[in-house]
């Protein structure tokens, strides 16, 4: 059965192709948009250290388990969990892991596409010089005008969904693989060039100190919750994307080395993004803890005040758009792979999944304007969908993955599939997965609900 499924979806050409693809899935708006502003809000270096600890404790162990499940069954996450639950006589509710992940990814794609559309819009605004000489009030008005315009939001939401669907429809080798081989090196090059520029700014030393200086007094319980949640979200865990990519992973690749490499690259991108953003912010005397508006309101002011700022700003928003695109591709893949296994062609499956995500995304578009006053539970429709996926569905999926691999799969099968060369490393991972990671993820889940 596994060989048939391998033939249906294909296999990455090499271990490094999987690393690029998985890093592309992990590196997205969470690294370049969210990580810098939550670092700013939570005190800088002490938060970074807590975040790195959370990556090691909760992120990498669960990621390794999720990749293992995908490679073991060689199917979509939905059919992977159905097949493996039966094979290991696990309770039937573990089948829900696949559905939970695919549905969470579908929900996230619907609003992720809208926010990614903002980066496309801002790329154009930077090119046209809209922020040249703009102050904070003017930048706020430009951002407010964008959110208040459902037509413009819809246009960029549509463009982004089409770009995502175009890649997925071409398949694993012709679409996903060829795209990540271009996008990820381009992303790394642009990030390094932008950091090289930020090193020339007068605020680089201050930005570096802010990002890496350690002050334990600034850590709070909320900071720990945020760090745990972001470590989990940034690695694309619990939404089926990593499990789907794991299904295309070469059998002879070491799971441990591969996943650790992905975790390191993902973290380096987040830290480098901070070294790009904070020196520019400090150079202009702006507030590093500006919240979600840091990228769309604070940074444009900084770019507009810099010599050659239009060029630097344009390059930055292209970088963010590329990161968002590589993530969106992986988010949609689990649902498309399942539809292909049900008998649909890849093109038809892509049109159905991306079309439905586009339609649901229109409610997010309207959440910022026409339906902004229609609130329930956690706020607007967008607020509720974001809360449902980030605080409930993803942590729950990750918790079930850790429990299933740690407690229900036979250890011999786990050890064989993991293919970890060092017995000590394998044993540490197994203990983390069975005891530490579930408690950490449960902590995120309970705090999210409360």
Image (tube, helix red, strand yellow):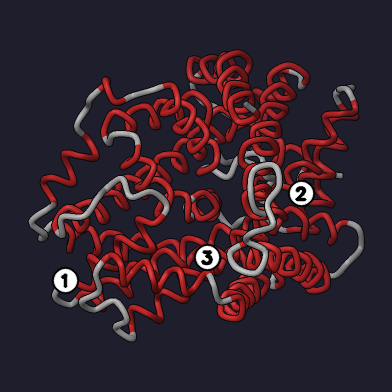
Q: Quadrant of residue 148?
A: bottom right
Find residue 116 and name its label: 3
Front residue of this view, candidates 343 and 216: 216
Any part of residue 259 in sight: yes
Under tag 2, what secondary structure?
helix
Residue in the picture at 77% in, 36% down: 97
**Residue 121: image x %, image y %?**
46, 76
Under tag 1, what secondary structure?
loop
Image depth: mark 2 or mark 1 in front:
1
**Residue 92: image x %, image y %?**
90, 28
**Residue 269: image x %, image y %?**
36, 50
Pointers 3 and 2 in contact (CB under 8 A)? no
Judged left or right of residue 338, residue 418 is left
* Mark 1 lies on residue: 306
Judged left or right of residue 259, residue 441 is right
Between discs 3 and 2, the one toward the N terminus = 2
Seen as rendered, the residue at the extreme front is 373
Report, in whole angstroms, how far the alpha carbon at label 1 lies from the one at label 3. Answer: 25 Å
């Amino acid at each position: 059965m596994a060989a048939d499924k391998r033939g249906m979806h294909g296999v990455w050409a090499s271990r490094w192709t999987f690393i690029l693809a998985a890093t592309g899935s992990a590196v997205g708006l969470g690294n370049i948009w969210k990580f810098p502003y939550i670092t700013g809000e939570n005190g800088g270096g002490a938060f970074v250290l807590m975040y790195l600890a959370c990556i090691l404790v909760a992120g990498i162990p669960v990621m390794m388990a999720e990749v293992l499940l995908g490679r073991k069954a060689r199917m979509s996450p939905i059919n992977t969990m159905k097949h493996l639950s039966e094979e290991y006589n696990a309770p039937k509710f573990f089948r829900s892991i696949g559905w939970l992940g695919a549905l969470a990814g579908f929900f996230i794609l619907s609003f992720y596409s809208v926010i990614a559309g903002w980066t496309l819009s801002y790329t154009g605004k930077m090119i046209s010089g809209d922020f040249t000489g703009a102050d904070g009030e003017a930048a706020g008005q430009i951002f407010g005008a964008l959110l208040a315009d459902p037509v413009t939001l819809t246009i960029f939401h549509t463009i982004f969904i089409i770009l995502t669907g175009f890649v997925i429809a071409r398949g694993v080798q012709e679409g996903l693989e060829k795209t990540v081989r271009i996008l990820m090196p381009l992303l790394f090059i642009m990030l390094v060039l932008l950091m090289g520029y930020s090193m020339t700014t007068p605020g680089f030393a201050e930005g570096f100190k802010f990002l890496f200086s350690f002050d334990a007094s600034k850590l709070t319980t909320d900071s720990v919750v945020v760090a745990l949640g972001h470590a989990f979200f940034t690695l694309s865990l619990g939404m089926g994307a990593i499990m789907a990519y794991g299904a295309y992973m070469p059998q002879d690749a070491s799971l441990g080395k591969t996943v650790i490499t992905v975790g390191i690259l993902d973290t380096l991108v987040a830290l480098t993004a901070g070294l790009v953003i904070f020196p520019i912010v400090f150079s202009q005397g702006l507030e590093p803890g500006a919240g979600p508006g840091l990228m769309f309101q604070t940074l444009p002011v900084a770019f507009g005040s810099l010599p050659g700022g239009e060029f630097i700003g344009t390059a930055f928003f292209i970088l963010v758009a590329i990161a968002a695109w590589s993530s969106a591709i992986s988010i949609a893949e689990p649902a498309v792979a399942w539809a292909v296994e049900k008998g649909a062609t890849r093109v038809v499956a892509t049109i159905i999944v991306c079309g439905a995500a586009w339609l649901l995304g229109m409610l997010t578009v309207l959440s910022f304007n026409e339906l902004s006053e229609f609130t329930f539970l956690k706020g607007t429709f967008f607020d509720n969908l974001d809360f449902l996926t980030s605080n409930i569905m993803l942590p729950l999926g990750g918790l079930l993955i850790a429990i299933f691999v740690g407690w229900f799969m036979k250890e011999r099968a786990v050890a064989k599939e993991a293919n970890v060369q060092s017995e000590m490393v394998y044993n540490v991972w197994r203990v983390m997965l069975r005891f530490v990671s579930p408690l950490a993820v449960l902590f995120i889940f309970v705090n999210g609900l409360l």
